[in-house]
Amino acid sequence: MSTARPSECGYRPVSPCTGLNPRLKAHGLALPNLGDVDPQSVAGAVSTGTHGTGGKLFGISKAVVAVQLVTATGEVLEIDEEHPWFGASRVTLGALGIVTEVTLQCVPAFLLHAREEPMPLPEVMGRLDSLVADNDHFEFYWFPHTEKTSIKRNNRVPEGTERKPVGAFRHWLDDEFLSNTAFEGVNRVLARKPSWIPRVNQISGSVLSAREYVDDSYNVFVSTRKVRFRESEFALPREALPSVLAELATWFGAGHANISFPIEVRFTAADDVWMSTGHERDNCYVAVHQYWRTDYDEYFAAAQDIFTAHEGRPHWGKAAHPRCELTLLSGTRASATSWRFATSCDPARTFSNPYLDRVLG
């Protein structure tokens, strides 16, 4: 269960089973930032550090103001901002216990003006500082083996602005057919014909034309994802991004695996959440993807070597080599305290599993 806290009125219980975002809207509320998919449970999104994008904004865990969890001994802990373990309770990886209630600091519901368009990668990098600073939410997708990107600028609109969502046909064409049905079919073919990928990426980077619309924030943040893929994502210091993308381009150019999925790049501000990838550091996030029918080991290993060489922190909810997961633990001052709390909550490691054994030691 989750609880939404509006700015001026009392708590309102919200069941995640009915869809958090529409329920919040019904009460005139919204979360200030979201990831680009929303099928996760509230506890899962919070506990793994789901972050979204926004150069001055934060991930969902930063909106948490209280957590109720049940420990391995059956004790019910009520943890709020005054509790000494509050910092550990907002990104837990499930190690502390069962999260039974989350209280989220919400904001009044708002509309976003979305502007999506192609832009060459050199232009994106040349304008990057202003694109991040001058937009509430900025991200881009880079098509490997090309200099093509698709950028997204999402900005809050003045009160009273009319909602103008994407038309039904354009939504079907762009978001259902091209981005899902056609993309799935193309990737099935490319899994058997990987040598075609660079040329197809040139075409794919030109298919989606520019568009603008105004819609409820969660309808702009959240995208339809029907094509199965594997993903690895790392948080990096923002100043590392040009070197990271250049090194990935060099790896592609050296004749290694051909990659059909775009690389996603997003941005968030530093936070104070103990096990967050954004702990005390402004970040860019670089996410690499591979179609599920195609082997991903070589690509992800090469990308992770590049990321970790630039102080990368792996996203807890996505794929990462065991040696990479440990870089986050060693990279945040609060991590040792967080795991002392985990040990005190669950000394017998009732909630442990092979993954947690690996990252907790």
Image: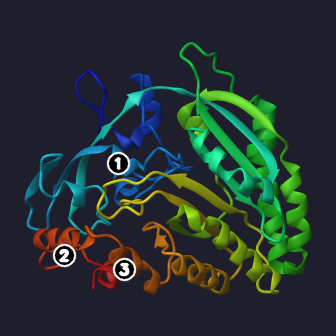
Kindly indicate the quadrant of the structure image that contains residue 317.
Answer: bottom left
Marking on residue 305: none
* Residue 12 vertical position relative to residue 122 in the rendered view, above or below: above
The residue depicted at 39 percent of the width and 43 percent of the height is 17
The residue depicted at 78 percent of the width and 56 percent of the height is 149
Q: How far is disc 1 from disc 2 in space, using C-alphas?
A: 27 Å
Marking on residue 355: 3
Which residue is identified by label 1? 62
Q: Where is residue 222 in the image (x, y as percent from the top left)?
A: 58, 44
The residue depicted at 78 percent of the width and 63 percent of the height is 143
Marking on residue 350: 2
Label count reads 3
The residue depicted at 8 percent of the width and 67 percent of the height is 73
Kindly indicate the quadrant of the structure image that contains residue 144.
Answer: bottom right
Q: How far is disc 1 from disc 3 in space, using C-alphas?
A: 24 Å
Q: Position of residue 139 (x, y in %)?
A: 64, 50
* Residue 203 vertical position relative to residue 155 in the rendered view, above or below: below
